[in-house]
Amino acid sequence: MASFQHLKSTLTTAFFVLLMFASGTVLAQAETSQSAASVISESVSDIVNINTAPAERLAKVLHGVGPKKAEAIVVWREENGGFQHVEELMEVKGIGEKLMDKNRDRIVIQ
């Protein structure tokens, strides 16, 4: 009888250890998924379509671009029928190669 109690106690302990391990793994996976979703969400909000974005969005997303440069981008876009290539952004007064290098990965053209 003592042997049965010892076996029952050992199995119960093993069950709880496995249960705790499994729940910890599930929680870790859930945290990782939330973290990945957050990174993706932040990454998407750091991208701007220079052919459609209003000046406020351009100023918010592009490093080194304030309200005046953002408005100049919109004016250039309207006068020239939009950007065909990212490099055309350097045709806007005040936007040079250094500013382009800071923002190249934030710009899309659609």
Image: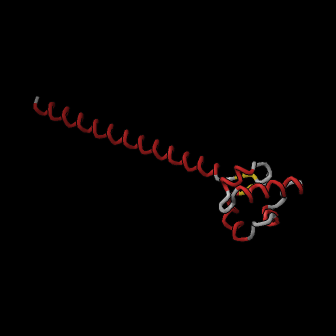
The residue under the point 71% across, 55% down is: 67
- Quadrant holding the N terminus: top left
**Camera-side residue: 74 or 30?**
74
Image-quadrant location for residue 63: bottom right
Residue that sits furthest to the left in the current view:
2
Q: 1 or 102, which lies in front?
A: 102
Q: In the orientation shown, which residue stands out farthest toward the top?
A: 1
Q: Is residue 1 above or below residue 23?
A: above
Question: In the displayed image of the protein, which residue is found farthest to the right?
Answer: 80
User: Looking at the picture, how far across and down is residue 15, in whole percent?
Assistant: 28, 36
Rendered view: 4 above or below 63: above
Report how many numbered discs are placed on residues in the image.
Answer: 0
Q: Position of residue 101 (x, y in %)?
A: 69, 68
- Measured as percent of width and height from the top left, residue 44 is found at 64, 49
| Above/below status of 9 relative to 48 | above
Q: Is residue 25 left or right of residue 81?
A: left
Residue 75: give x, y in percent of width and height: 83, 55
67 displayed left or right of 41:
right
- The residue under the point 78% across, 48% down is 52
Compared to residue 24, the image places residue 90 above or below, namely below
Determine the image quadrant of residue 106: bottom right
Q: Residue furthest bottom?
A: 97
Closer to the camera in the image, 28 or 107 = 107
Q: Residue at x 89, y 55 (%)?
A: 79
Q: Is residue 7 left or right of residue 35?
A: left
Residue lying at 50% horizontally and 43% vertically, measured from the top left:
34
Relative placement, left or right, of 14 versus 76 is left
The one nearer the camera, 74 or 101, is 74
